[in-house]
Image: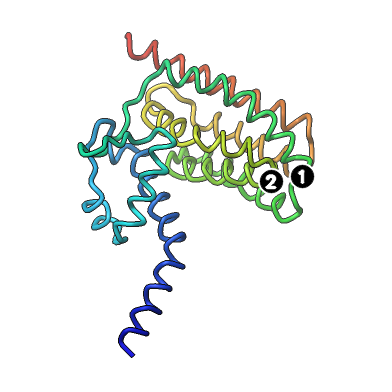
């Protein structure tokens, strides 16, 4: 009986491992993006597992995913480091983001379900509220929700996978500098405009809103160079 119980428990643990990995990924990513785990910090599976209250296997799998996205650097037999932030890399990343995000915005406007359009409307309303209250954490979470929803609604797994490699890096760069050089209410409103264009099936408007948003993000990124040299 004990052997059967152990096997059943192992099966349950394995079945739930995917969701635990997703949870570990979300929580570690937020810690990195919001600089609670700073660039250059040394991470260990054991410490993170204890901090999150999650087993080491899901934490290990989450770190591997974060490594593919460039948020951590995994050094075999040496440890895990939170990656450094580089403005030049961010500008090159934006070149790719601009083209992919325009494509995905148009596709989402064409292909989003009625339920997804309702979610886009809710995100737009949340972004407007974040703009009014200048709430950086609420903005960050809504930004992540919008990115995930666009990726789902676009129905293009190739574009979605490519974009997934960039969003965490972009949010972290934003969080590091937004209090110095960003106009958060304006940026939140640009996100709201994008979400509403998709919600209302405005294909051309969604593409234009995406370009306006990337124009602002590039301006913001370049402004960090000026701030750093001041």
Q: What secondary structure is marked by label 1?
A: helix
Q: Is residue 29 above or below residue 14?
A: above
Dot 1, how many residues are within 10 Å of its Cα: few (below 14), some (14-19), or many (20+)?
A: some
Labelled pair 1, 2 in contact (Cβ < 8 Å):
yes
Residue at 32 percent across and 37 percent down: it is 35
Residue at 46 percent across and 14 percent down: it is 222
The residue that mark 2 highlights is 153
Find residue 102 and report its image quarter: top right
Left or right of residue 199, residue 100 in this image: left
Residue at 69 percent across and 46 percent down: it is 153
First-in-chain label (1 vs 2)? 1
Left or right of residue 189, residue 55 in this image: left
Measuring from the top left, give residue 230's x and y in whole percent. 32, 9
Q: Which mark is residue 111?
A: 1
Left or right of residue 102, residue 75 in this image: left
Q: Distance between the residues labelled 1 and 2?
A: 6 Å
Measuring from the top left, give residue 79's x and y in whole percent. 22, 39
């Amino acid at each position: 009986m004990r052997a059967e119980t152990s096997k059943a428990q192992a099966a349950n643990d394995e079945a739930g491992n995917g969701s635990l990995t997703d949870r570990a990924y979300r929580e570690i990513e937020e810690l990195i993006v919001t600089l609670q785990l700073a660039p250059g910090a040394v991470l260990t599976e054991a410490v993170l597992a204890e901090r999150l209250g999650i087993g080491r296997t899901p934490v290990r799998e989450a770190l591997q995913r974060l490594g593919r996205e460039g948020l951590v650097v995994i050094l075999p037999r040496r440890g895990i480091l939170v990656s450094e932030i580089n403005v030049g890399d961010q500008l090159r990343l934006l070149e790719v983001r601009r083209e992919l995000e325009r494509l995905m915005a148009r596709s989402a406007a064409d292909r989003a379900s009625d339920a997804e359009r309702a979610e886009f409307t809710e995100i737009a309303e949340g972004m407007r509220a974040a703009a009014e209250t200048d709430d950086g954490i609420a903005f960050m979470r809504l930004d992540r929700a919008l990115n995930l929803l666009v990726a789902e609604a676009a129905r293009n797994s190739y574009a979605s996978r490519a974009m997934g490699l960039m969003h965490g890096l972009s949010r972290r760069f934003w969080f590091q500098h937004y209090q110095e050089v960003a106009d958060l209410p304006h940026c939140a409103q640009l996100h709201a405009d994008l979400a509403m264009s998709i919600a209302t099936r405005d294909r051309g408007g969604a593409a234009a809103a995406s370009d306006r948003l990337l124009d602002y993000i590039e301006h913001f990124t370049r402004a960090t160079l000026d701030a750093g040299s001041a």
